[in-house]
Image (cartoon, grey):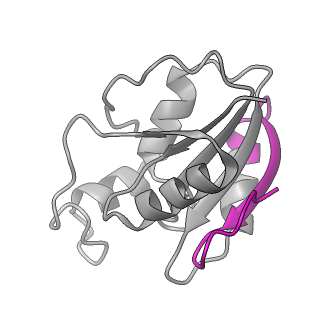
């Protein structure tokens, strides 16, 4: 089974966990990169007019991302992100909607300073009922191996 760890990371925390996971399971890794990188001011969740706040207040927001490499050859895709406002950042939605994930096993992972992952996974299942989500885990600690 060919595995790919795809991740969005605004501050580097999720990137670190994604790379640990990829190394632990022998998977390739690929970042979801916004076309316009986020600045510290963009990520200020206390400012209701910051870029991240505006995106998260609008469920239809789909920030532009850089084009990714072809993912068609992978059987299992791990999708990771920091939890923003209880769910995945909108750039993750852009990635999901820009790629054909039919027939692939999807494993969700996230990092968070205070939220659990259950709500984020349920939100993903509600928004993308056709995704074959086979597991999910919060990765705030050391990554020891596969997470499903």
Judged left or right of residue 36, residue 2 is right
Who is closer to the viewer here, 121 or 103?
103
In the image, residue 102 sits, relative to residue 111, either above or below, namely above
- Was residue 25 drawn as part of the magenta stretch in this picture? no
Who is closer to the viewer here, 145 or 136?
145
- How many marks do you count on the picture? 0
**Percent x, y for residue 114?**
55, 84
Classify residue 3 by image quadrant.
top right
Q: In which quarter of the image is the C terminus?
A: bottom right
Who is closer to the viewer here, 94 or 139?
139
Q: In which quarter of the image is the N terminus?
A: top right
* Residue that appears at 76% across and 59% down: 147
Q: Quick one: which residue is furthest to the bottom in this view?
A: 114
Judged left or right of residue 142, residue 135 is right
**Percent x, y for residue 46?**
28, 78
- Was residue 146 drawn as part of the magenta stretch in this picture? yes
Classify residue 134 by image quadrant.
top right
Residue stretch rendered in magenta on the structure: 125-148
**Percent x, y for residue 78?**
65, 44
* Residue that appears at 24% across and 55% down: 51
* Residue that appears at 33% across and 40% down: 33
Judged left or right of residue 24, residue 111 is left
* Residue that appears at 51% across and 63% down: 17
In the image, residue 125 sits, relative to residue 62, either above or below, namely below
**Percent x, y for residue 36?**
19, 40
């Amino acid at each position: 089974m060919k595995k790919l760890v795809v991740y969005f990371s605004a501050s580097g925390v999720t990137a670190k966990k994604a790379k640990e996971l990829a190394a632990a399971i022998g998977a390739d890794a690929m970042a979801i990169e916004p076309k316009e990188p986020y600045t510290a001011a963009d990520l200020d969740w206390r400012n209701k007019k910051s870029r991240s706040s505006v995106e998260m207040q609008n469920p239809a927001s789909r920030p532009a991302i850089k084009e990714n490499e072809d993912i068609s050859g992978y059987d299992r895709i791990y999708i990771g992100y920091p939890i923003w406002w209880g769910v995945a950042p909108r750039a993750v939605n852009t990635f999901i909607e820009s790629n054909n994930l039919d027939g692939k096993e999807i494993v969700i992972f996230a990092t968070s300073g205070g939220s659990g992952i259950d709500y984020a996974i349920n939100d993903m299942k509600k928004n993308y009922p056709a995704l074959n989500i086979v597991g999910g885990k919060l990765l705030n600690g050391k990554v020891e191996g596969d997470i499903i």
